Amino acid sequence: MTLREIPVTRAAIYVPGGRNPYPSTLIMGVVTARAAGVEEVCVVTPPPVHPVILGAAALAGVHEVYAMGGAHAVAALAYGTESVPRVDVIAGPGNLWVQEAKRQVSDAVGIDGFYGPSDLAVVFDADADLDPIALDLLAQGEHGPASVVLAASDDADALDALADRVAELAAERETVDAGAVVLAHAASPTEALAVSEAFAPEHLQLVGPSCERLARRVQRAGCVLVGGASGTAFGDYVAGSNHCLPTGGAARFASGLSARVFRRRMSEVRLGAAASALAPAGAAIARAEGFEVHAQSMEARIGQHAGEGI
């Protein structure tokens, strides 16, 4: 038995556009699909389609761009319409309506996962520089008011100072809605990490020597960014990781977007002479399950393919 991996034929990348254009999401999705070997990659994005989206689509080699968004766009891709051919996989982030639509059509089309409102956890110690962390927390607010951010530390004074700094920076940037900001005081860096593990964030930043040493212990996060220089925004754009990541605690069981999403595995079996050796065992199992004809179909091959090898 061999295992073959085959790319799907047609994939769609959902690119959000209700609040801002996201050429970065287009690149993250389309390049990944093309790297996986997908023959046809289309993009859907809410109208009006921003010129920067069209430019990114042209650079990435997109086959089609559809000016449509929301749950109805997901349905069109999953089932097909007179003007929109159905696809094999739908990938990309979006609001809760889009993600719920993806979930509901997942019996008819492959999906990458539930990539909804953004979230972030920062685990830091007393040696961390608080200003960049405050900006990292506020940056998630730019994705929308449904974003959730968590800061956990074993230093209560640092947590208080961080809260004040976030408030100051938010006041200076009136257009940013920080969404839900949760501060957690832990007894130790290990306990602070345990808080993050329970949260299973989309992004996890570990800042400060005692926290950065815990990177290998992380099991529940979409992407782990280690060190004061490794802000989440770098991962969103230029660090090399994919920013299409599991949200809402889905990092407990899901992974970020990769070529695997656009490829499927298929077993190829060639038995030959091995059929004679396997048939008695297989027939015994089949009869135990009450499937007599299954047993007979295997036994019919005994001695029939002796010269064919395994």
Image (cartoon, grey):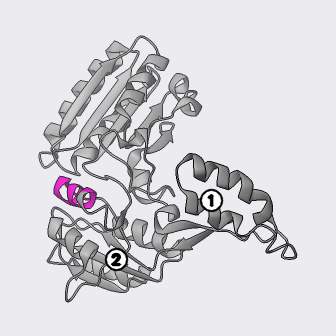
Residue 74 within the magenta-colored segment of the rendering: no
Q: Which residues are magenta?
A: 94-103
Residue 43, percent across and down? 31, 76
The image quarter in which residue 113 lies: bottom left
Residue receiving disc 2: 87
Direction top: furthest residue: 187
Where 92 falls versus 88 (above or below)? above
Residue 178, percent across and down? 19, 40
Give 109 or 33, whichever is nearer the viewer.
Answer: 109
Left or right, 172 with respect to 31, comes to: left
Left or right, 13 with respect to 303, comes to: left
Amino acid type at circle 1 is: Ala
* Prevalent SS, magenta region: helix
Amino acid type at circle 2 is: Val
Q: Secondary structure at mark 2?
A: loop
The answer, for residue 289, to whether it is visible in the render is yes
Mark linked to residue 196: none
Q: Secondary structure at mark 1?
A: helix
